[in-house]
Image (cartoon, rainbow, N blue to C red):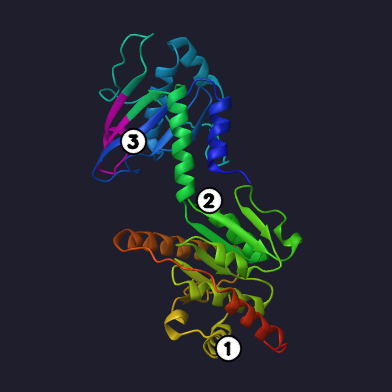
Amino acid sequence: MTSKVQSLKAFLGGAGRVALVEVAGTKGSTPRETGAYMLVSGAAIFGTIGGGQLEYMAIDKARQLLFSPLEGEMAAERPEGVVSEGTARAPSTAAATPPDGFAATLPSRGRDTRTTLDVPLGPEIGQCCGGRVEVLIRLVDTALEQELVAAADAEQAQLPHVYIFGGGHVGQALASAVALLPVRVVVVETRAEALEGMPDTVETSLTPMPEAMVRKASAGAAFVVLTHDHALDFLIVAEALKRRDAAYVGMIGSKTKKATFRNWFLKAADGSEAQFADLVSPIGGDAVKDKRPQVIAALAAAEIMTALAAHAGASRAAPRLSWQGNGRLTARIRATLICRPEFP
C-alpha cells in the first residue's frame, strides 16, 4: 500500500529544489481553504491550491524563487509532471505569468527564501470566484521538510476509516472510488483472489472472520457490506450496528433483503429498532436505477463521504462514545447462522 505520506516523501526525496506554496489567507469565495498547499519543483508539482490561473501564477512565482532567470527558462521548457496521490497531469497550455499588477516583487537573488501573492479572484485573471487569496511561497529546507512530513503523518493518523467488506465487482469499484478521498480504505475479504488488483492506496485484510474487523475499528468509521454471502453480510452488519459509534453502516441489496435482515436482526440477533434505523440499504440511494458497479460505487462514495463529514461535525460538538466488542454476541449470531442453512 502506498500512502500519501510515502508519496510526499518520494517527491521531496527526488524533486531537487522545492518550494512550498501555501494558502495563507482567504476572503470570500475561494477554490481552497487556508492551509491548503502544494509543492513545486522545476519539473513537477505535488498537491494543489485549487487549480486555474491562481495556481499557474503561484507555480510561476515559486519557480522564480527557486531558480535564476536562466534556470527558470530551462525549467519551464521541461515537461511538467504532477505528483498528486499518484496521478500524472499533462503539461498545461495556460499562461503561467500573472497579469500586470499581481506579481509580487522579489528581493535580490541570493537571500530570497519566501515571497507572497495577494490575488483577487476576478476577471483580471480569468476567474470569477469573487474572493481573494493570499499565497505564501517558501523554499523548503530540511527543517520545513521535516515539518511537512510530520504534519502529513498526523493528518493521516486522523483520517476516518472506510471498511469495505467484499472485493467483488462493486467492492473493487467502490475501493477505487473511495481511494481518491481523504480516508483510509480497508477492503476485507475471506477470498484471497478477490483482493487482487486493488488500488495501491488501499489496505487489504484477508481473514476467515470479517466481523472481527468491525470490533477492531476506531470510532467514527464507515462500514460498507457487500460480500458474496448474504448470511455473512447480516453477521457483519449486525456487529456494526451494535457499535453505536459508526459514522455509516451500509449494506448492498434490495428492499426485500433489508426487510429480511430486519426480521432476523430483531428476533435472532438481539437488535433494536433504534439500531436498525442506522442501516443504509440499498447503498447509494434509489434515485438512480443504474445497477452497474461503477455507478453504484460513485453514488455510495458520495453517500459515505457525506456521512463521515456529518459525523465529524457532530463529534466536535458532543462527547465521543466508547465501545467494546462483544465476542459472545458474535459467537451466538454465528451459531444461529450456521444452524440455519436456509438463511437467505
Dots 3, 1 in contact, CB < 8 A: no
Query: Residue 260's spot in the image, x, y percent?
Result: 57, 87
Residue 133 - label: none
| 284 lies above or below 161 | below
> Residue 14, how many percent across, how many down?
58, 25
Q: Nearer the viewer, residue 280 or 189?
A: 189
Check disc 3 and report its element: helix, strand or loop: strand
Query: According to the image, label 2 marks what residue?
Result: 180
Cα distance in 3D space between marks 2 and 3: 22 Å
Residue depicted at x 53% and y 51%: 180
As rendered, which of 203 and 300 lies closer to the eye? 203
Q: Which residues are magenta?
A: 116-135
Mark 3, other Cα within 10 Å: few <14 / some 14–19 / many ≥20: many
Which of disc 1 and disc 2 is earlier in sequence? 2
Label 1: how many residues lie within 10 Å, few (<14), some (14-19) or many (20+)? Answer: few
Q: Residue furthest left?
A: 27
In this image, 98 relative to 199: left or right?
A: left
| Residue 80 visible in the current orientation | no
Of the numbered discs 3 and 1, the one sitting upstream in the chain is 3
Q: Amino acid at mark 1?
A: Ala
Of badges 3 and 1, the one in the foreground is: 1
Q: What residue is disc 1 on?
A: 268
Q: Is residue 192 magenta?
A: no
Secondary structure of residue under mark 2 = loop
* Residue type at numbered disc 2: Leu
- Residue at (65, 86) in percent of width and height: 336
User: The disc labelled 3 sits on which kind of residue?
Assistant: Val
Q: Which mark is residue 23?
A: 3
